[in-house]
Image (cartoon, grey):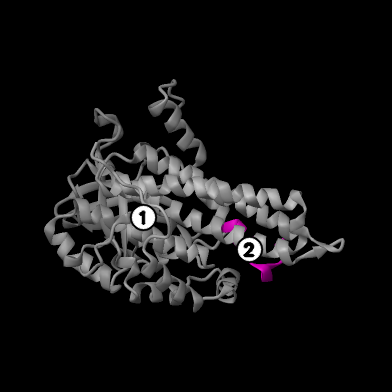
Amino acid sequence: MQEVTVGLGEDYADIRDSVRRICADFPNEYWRDIDKREAYPTEFVQAMTDSGFLAALIPEEYGGAGLPIRAAGVILQECHANGCYAAAAHAQMYTMGTLLRHGSPEQKAKYLPKIASGELRLQAFGVTEPTTGTDTTKLKTRAVRDGDHYVVNGQKVWTSRAEHSDLMLLLVRTTPVEEVQKKTDGLSVLLVDMQQAKGNGLEIRKLDAMINHNTTELFFDDLRVPVENLIGPEGKGFRCILDGMNAERILVSHESIGDADWFIRTASQYATERVVFDRPIGQNQGIQFPIARAYAEMQAADMMVRKAAALFEAGEPCGEDANIAKLLASEAAWNAAEACMQTHGGFGYAREYDVERRWREARVQRIAPISTNLVLAYRGQHVLGMPRSY
């Protein structure tokens, strides 16, 4: 392994300042309203697009900024630390990685400049299915070759932003699992034109959920996708999406660090200002200590997130580190959320304080994009050598 350096301190200061200025235009009232209406934050996503931040990872030759994944993570972290919810747009950063690393020169030339400019949104990632969940190799959505098209039939669930995306990366099985030697073989990645597909073999249904994640379930009924939209070799799609999955874990971990930062600062300020029994409640160790512990957990998780990003950027194996970063960051954010909610007491339930909304949003990171239990199972089996549990 080559030498990898992990930086300390507030890196990318200019980017952070720019993101903070954008976030200032989208105060808590904006997000409260979006959450209440279960709407898509179109204005916020457009502002992030116009700034070029959503094209941070796209190489300059295709109209992007060509920045390292740490810089992209800082963008998302600052969004969350400053009260915004970048989950509405973050998929554009990691889904395009599959296209960038495994797409043909023609595919990259056709799509990446338009994604970088915002003309096209690549926000949807169709992987999870209702009957197989995170057992990705058992997915049942089939794509059968028919001349110069694949014919797709099946179903996906928890596909976020499908209603607000022009393109979708879709993982399908092109060879039945019983016909392959390795269960990871026989999977392929298709780039789906959502606008063309809707009503022509694709049905999208909105899923109501605890948080406003604009998530949907998808139904494919003889959807025809041109063979030229195959990303990477047929049957090797699982490998094609692995880079995207590691990038996803690293990027959402930055969001969790931003969430923890927001909760800790919000709780500390309220604990200092709120007076009960003639004294600030932050003077009580029962209030003060959970917030202080959450701060320590955030700092420790931040170091792991930085390490995972550095390894990814250096092209070194980073699956273990990306998953550990996601585990620690999501738990740091959740513990900070709990401390903040408890500090606010009854007012934590009041929507005007924004704690309950962000508390709900922080909780999802312990389940998606991969659950805490699966991260631990991977650690136990593949790192520590214990018996396989699934």
Disc nearest the viewer among 2 and 1 = 2
What residue sits 24% from the left and 70% below the top?
Answer: 114
**Earlier sequence position, callout 2 versus callout 1:** 1
Q: Quadrant of the C terminus?
A: top left
What residue sits 46% from the left and 41% below the top?
Answer: 131
Residue lying at the far right in this picture: please name it: 277
Which residue is more in the foreground, 309 or 34?
309
Residue lying at the far left in this picture: please name it: 105
What residue sits 46% from the left and 31% below the top?
Answer: 377
| Magenta-drawn segment | 348-361
- Using residue 10 as the reference point, say whether residue 221 is left or right of it: left
Taking the image as drawn, is residue 349 in sight?
no
351 part of magenta stretch: yes
- Say which residue label 2 marks: 266
Which residue is more in the foreground, 213 or 227?
213
Under tag 2, what secondary structure? helix
